[in-house]
Amino acid sequence: MGRRGRRQDGWAGRCAPAVLLAPVVLALLLLLPRAAAAQECRLALLLALDVSASVDTEEYALQRDGLAAALNDPDIRQVILLGGAPVALAAYEWSGRYQQAVILPWMMLGSDADIDRAVARIGGATRSHEGFPTAAGYALGYAAGLLAEAPPCDRQVIDVSGDGINNEGFSPALAYAHFPLAEVTVNGLAVSGPDSAVVSFYEGELIRGPGAFVQVAQGFADFRRAMTLKLFRELNDMRLGSAGGTRCCG
C-alpha cells in the first residue's frame, strides 16, 4: 500500500506541472492569432514636404499646419480608424541633394490617441533646412530608405508635396531605375504658383504606379484643403474611373 501510494505520488508529482501548465499554454496559443492580427497593416504612407528655397517662412507654416489639420480632419480620422487594419505613417522634409530630415518616424495609427500624437508631432515641427534647391530624385531615393524601415503593409505610398520642378541632382526617372520602388505608388501634391511647370512636372515625371495621381493646391493657402482630399483618396485606395462616389471632408 505504501509503495502503491508512493507510485501514485510520483505520477502526480511528475504530471501535476503539465496539468497545471496546460491552461496557460492553451491561453497563449489562443492569443497567437490575435497578436499576428495586431501587426497587420493596410497602408504604409510616407509624407514628403518640400522645404526648398522657393518655400518661404509663411508658406512653410501653411504647409506644415495644413498637413497637421488634414490628419486631424474628422473624415480622415474616420477612414483611418474604420478602414480595417491600421495605417503606418511617417513624414520627412526634403529640398537639396543631402537636405532631408524625418519629422515623424514610423508609427502605427490604430486609435484616436495615435492620430493625436502624429498631429502634435507634425504641427510642432521646426523647419529642418532652407535656401537649398529642389532635388526630387534624391527625395525619392531617401524615401526608398525610409520605406525599407516601415512595418510590413499591404500597400506602400509616397506622398510628395512641392511647388517646383527638379533643379538639382538626378531625375525621378533615375531614382525609379536604381532604387527599390517598383512596388511603390508615388502620388503628388503640386502647389501652383510662380513656377508654371510644377503641375506638368508632377504629372509627367514624378508620379508612378497603379492609380497614381496629382492633387493640385492653388497656392499654399489651399494646401490644407488639397491635402485633406489627397489623404482621403489615398487611404481609401480610390482610383479614377472606379465605381462609387465616397464623399469626403465636409
Image: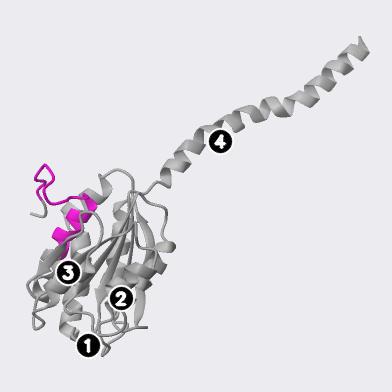
Using the rendered image of the protein, determine whether residue 103 is visible from the camera's viewpoint: no
Circles 4, 3 touching at the beta carbon (< 8 Å): no
Is label 3 or label 1 in front?
Answer: 3
Q: Secondary structure at mark 3?
A: helix
**In the rendered image, which quarter is residue 196 located in?**
bottom left
Q: Which mark is residue 204?
A: 3
Whichever of labels 4 and 3 marks the residue nearer the N terminus, that label is: 4
For image coordinates 16% across by 83% down, the residue present is 58
Magenta highlight range: 227-247
User: Amino acid under label 1?
Assistant: Ala
Circle 2 is placed at which residue position?
A: 137
User: Could you give the CA–CA distance between mark 2 and mark 4, rounded to whole angstroms?
Assistant: 48 Å
Q: Amino acid at mark 2?
A: Gly
CA–CA distance in space, label 3 to label 1: 23 Å
Circle on res. 28: 4
Callout 3, which amino acid? Answer: Gly
The dot on residue 53 is 1
Helix, strand or loop for disc 2: helix
Please rate how many residues cluster around mark 2, counting C-alpha atoms within 10 Å: few if below 14, some from 14 to 19, many from 20: many
Q: Would you say residue 246 sits in the magenta stretch?
A: yes
Could you tell which of marks 3 and 1 lies nearer the N-terminus? 1
- The answer to whether marks 1 and 4 mark residues whose Cβ atoms lie closer than 8 Å is no
In this rendering, the label closer to the viewer, 3 or 2: 3
In front: label 2 or label 4 = 2
The answer to whether residue 64 is magenta is no
Q: Is residue 186 left or right of residue 189?
A: right
